[in-house]
Amino acid sequence: MKKILIAFIIAFMVSFTMTAQDTIKIPQSELNKFFQAIDTLKQQDSTKTILISDLELQIQNYKTLVQQDSTLLLYRTQEMKLLNNQIKLYENRLKIVDRWYEKRWVGVIIGIVGTSSAIYLAGQIQ
């Protein structure tokens, strides 16, 4: 950037000297300020270039996170479907296996009532 500006200034001065044949003297303090401004702009440009590269990296990370999130959501929906199917299978199994008359306590009560009835009726026979 500095070289381009110097070349532009030299070209301007050469074209100006060809027409006027006079030389223009620029004070050294103005040249120093000019080059200092150029250096400042150069530093700002490099800083902004670094910021742009960092932002591009953030965009790439964001895209990666979006892709991972969509994958996780897909797996979660599949997991929910599978768990709902499993719940339905357990409900169907409970309907088939666990009838009230097939419970253990029903058998115990029937056994106690049947045994006591048999003993009572055996005692009535005399």
Image (spheres, rainbow, N blue to C red):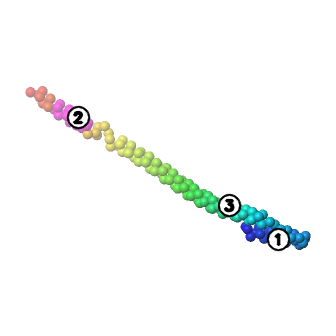
Q: Nearer the viewer, residue 96 or 36?
A: 36
Describe the element under mark 3 as helix, strand or loop. helix
Return the residue at label 2.
109
Amino acid type at mark 1: Ala
Return the residue at label 1.
11
Q: Earlier in the sequence, mark 1 or mark 2?
A: 1
Q: Which quadrant of the view contains residue 90?
A: top left
Rendered residue at 70%/62% (across/down): 40
Alpha-carbon span between mark 3 and mark 2: 91 Å
Looking at the image, residue 95 lies above or below residue 5: above
Rendered residue at 28%/40% (across/down): 102
x, y percentage for residue 69? 53, 53
Describe the element under mark 1 as helix, strand or loop. helix
Residue range in magenta is 105-118
- Was residue 23 drawn as part of the magenta stretch in this picture? no
SS assignment for the magenta stretch, majority: helix
For residue 55, side relative to residue 72 (left or right)? right
Rendered residue at 82%/71% (across/down): 11
Alpha-carbon span between mark 1 and mark 3: 26 Å
Which numbered circle lies on residue 44? Answer: 3
Q: Is there a contact, CB below 8 Å, between mark 3 and mark 2?
A: no
The answer, for residue 62, to whether it is visible in the render is yes
Alpha-carbon span between mark 1 and mark 2: 115 Å
Q: Earlier in the sequence, mark 3 or mark 2?
A: 3
Amino acid type at mark 3: Gln
| Name of the residue lying farthest toward the right | 20
Amino acid type at mark 2: Ile
User: For the residue carrying disc 2, how many other residues have a C-alpha within 10 Å: few (<14), some (14-19), or many (20+)?
Assistant: few
User: For the residue carrying disc 1, how many other residues have a C-alpha within 10 Å: few (<14), some (14-19), or many (20+)?
Assistant: few
Q: Earlier in the sequence, mark 1 or mark 3?
A: 1
Quarter holding the N terminus? bottom right
